[in-house]
Image (cartoon, grey):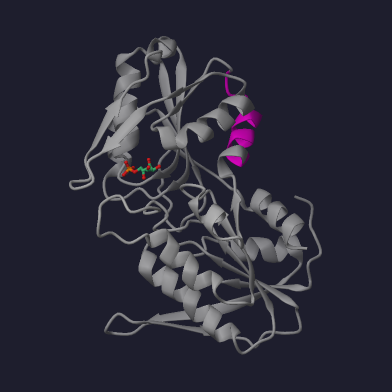
Amino acid sequence: MNRRDLRDLGIISLPGDPGYGSRFKELFNSRLYIVHQRIFPDGETYIRLVEDLQDEKKVLIIQSMFPEQDRRFFEILQILDILDNYDKEIYLLILYMAYARQDKVFLKGEPVSARIIMRYITQNNRVKKIYVAEPHSDYVSKEFSKIHSINLIKIMGEILRGKGISRRMVVVSPDQGGAERAKVLSEILDTEYLVFKKYRDRYTGSIKTEAPENIELVKGRETIIVDDILSTGGTVTEVASFLKRSGSERIYVLCAHCLFVSDALNKVLSGGVNKIFCGNTVKRFVEDSRVEYFDLSNSIGSYIAENIL
Ligand code: R5P
């Protein structure tokens, strides 16, 4: 992205921001406001906006809600409370939205957690737009008019294409919910895509995977599994085992939000995955030659610069 002059915009980087605040400061020529965080001995969160806001009309808050999802959510509510003291238009960038997978009542008696998050944030009248990077589903953008989704799979697909990825690679979605992601990526890479079926036991959380009928397409070819979130690695590992058994030569993973919970990385790599491409959307980076992070700050910055004005 070429440098854009957005002096009218102040940037507030919350503790979950994996570094976009300083990047945007350079890109937009904007002022970056520092937030100090402390955790009290009993576990309560304290934040403080160190410097008084200047005369910018707009502020962009940047947060990513992993790790420590609940704390990250509360920090957003805290900064909105602080901003009640100022007359600013508020924009919010959520690089990873926690609780997005609980976007419906799957079992009687459950809350819709994605709705709780957005209800609390959107009810503030000064909040004009909320940019959510690759939300799990289109639930939040359909339900709340202030929400704008940023399609990270498209951005990452273009980066991948720039690396000269082979056209013989087959794109694979691990479940029907991710079929659109696979379609988008396959169009960018100009190749075919397959969609697996995934069934989750809503009581135990365990998953069962069913391969598509045309799985033989992967024989002797490279494959790339595309997903929004890599959490425990269970989903990807399960699909990789099918692809391996069906004769896929090399298996890649492209994932917007790589959480790498507990031994996820080992699980995925020992399950036959050769390389993982991740977005830099959460403040947890693993160091391994088989994991490559794509810096998405330029593309996300461009999207916001075009949409915020
Ligand atoms: C669920 O539907 C998501 O799109 C991901 O497939 C899921 O969150 C991955 O989680 P895990 O890595 O724990 O299998």
Residue occupying image coordinates x 47% and y 58%: 97
Task: Give whichever of 180, 283 is nearer the camera.
Answer: 180
Q: Is residue 8 left or right of residue 235?
A: right
In the displayed orientation, state which residue is furthest to the front: 108
Estimate the x, y position of residue 211 in percent, counting from the top left.
33, 21
Vertical placement of residue 154 versus 309, above or below: above
Q: Is residue 188 left or right of residue 287?
A: right
Dominant SS type (magenta):
helix
The image quarter containing residue 62 is bottom right
The answer to if 157 sits in the magenta stretch is: yes
Q: Is residue 220 left or right of residue 303?
A: left
Count of marks overlaid on the render: 0
Estimate the x, y position of residue 4 in percent, counting from the top left.
80, 59
The answer to if 208 sits in the magenta stretch is: no
Residue occupying image coordinates x 64% and y 77%: 126
Instruction: Find the magenta span and give its range.
Output: 155-166
Q: Is residue 269 left or right of residue 76?
A: left
Estimate the x, y position of residue 18 in percent, counting from the top left.
51, 60
Which quadrant of the figure contains the C terminus?
Answer: bottom right
* Residue 49 makes an appearance in the image: no
The image quarter containing residue 100 is bottom left
